[in-house]
Amino acid sequence: MSSRLVNRITDTDIDTFERDGAVCLRQMFGQEWLDLLAQGVENAMSSSGRYTRQQSGDDDPGLYFSDYWASQRTPALREFVLNSPAAHITKDILRSSRINFFYDAVWVKEPGTQKRGAWHQDQPYYCVDGKQICIVWVPIDPVPKEVCLQLVRGSHRWGKSFAPIRFVDGGGYGRADHGYEPMPDIDNNLDQYEILSWELSPGDCIIFQGMLIHGSPSNITGGRRRAVSTTWLGDDTTYIERPGEMEPHPLEHNLKPGDSLDCDTFPRILPR
């Protein structure tokens, strides 16, 4: 399977990403990669890892499933990480000379799932820091706009870090007493924010910056909403120790705060 870009990244795409914190790119992944992702998702859901979770309660008529680093036990997802166009996309979008891989995440909302994904920034969860961090969110199924990932335009430029919470129960990670602010009440003040979301087809993707606020609505449709996200690191990223628990966090490493992430723990994908 080819890792080359199906469609070229334009200067407009890059400018949109830098200004808004997110950009929607159409038909960047061919059917062979989508089939591989679908296989990887099913394999992840039929096995279990360190970060495998059911985010929805037993009383939810649907199922909200998530899993981090499933590529460590799922060859199909590992193949996507190593050889799909995702790293090439991020190299252009981040204007980076190299791209290292952080982790993958599987997101499944079965039909009728009421549980939503809370508003959050990704980066305050992480053991990595920098401006050249982005996430590639690839849907496997058609995604109506009303169940698409929702992103607060420009929030990556607010200069604020919001305390991360657990999706499953709303608990914290020990950041609230260390300068991390509580997330504003976005749902009850939607007129104050510009929310980005799109109707997506398989092959499309959303690229967003690690500090951009985002969340996901319930799946009120009769179809599955399966997606895989991968997080990528550019030139300026370094290791960081945050107060409390970091997630996801590699178990074994010799990194110190400020160390470059061009290392075996975060493997370089580009240049080869």
Image (tube, rainbow, N blue to C red):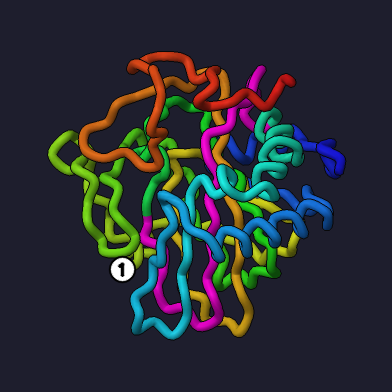
Q: Is residue 29 left or right of residue 111?
A: right
How crowded pointer 1 is (Cα within 10 Å; few <14, some 14-19, many 20+) is rated as: few
Q: Does residue 227 show up magenta in the picture? A: no
Give the magenta part as a residue range: 93-119
Residue at image location 67% in from the left, 47% down from the top: 75
**Could you say whether the residue bearing mark 1 is in a helix, strand or loop?**
helix
Q: Is residue 60 left or right of residue 43?
A: left
> Quarter holding the N terminus?
top right
Q: Does residue 102 show up magenta in the picture? A: yes
Three-letter residue code for mark 1: Asn
Q: Position of residue 20 (x, y in %)?
A: 54, 43
Residue 242 image-quadrant placement: top left
Residue at image location 66% in from the left, 34% down from the top: 90
Q: Which is nearer the eye, 109 or 181?
A: 109
Q: Does 106 appear above or below 60?
A: above
Q: Is residue 107 visible?
A: yes
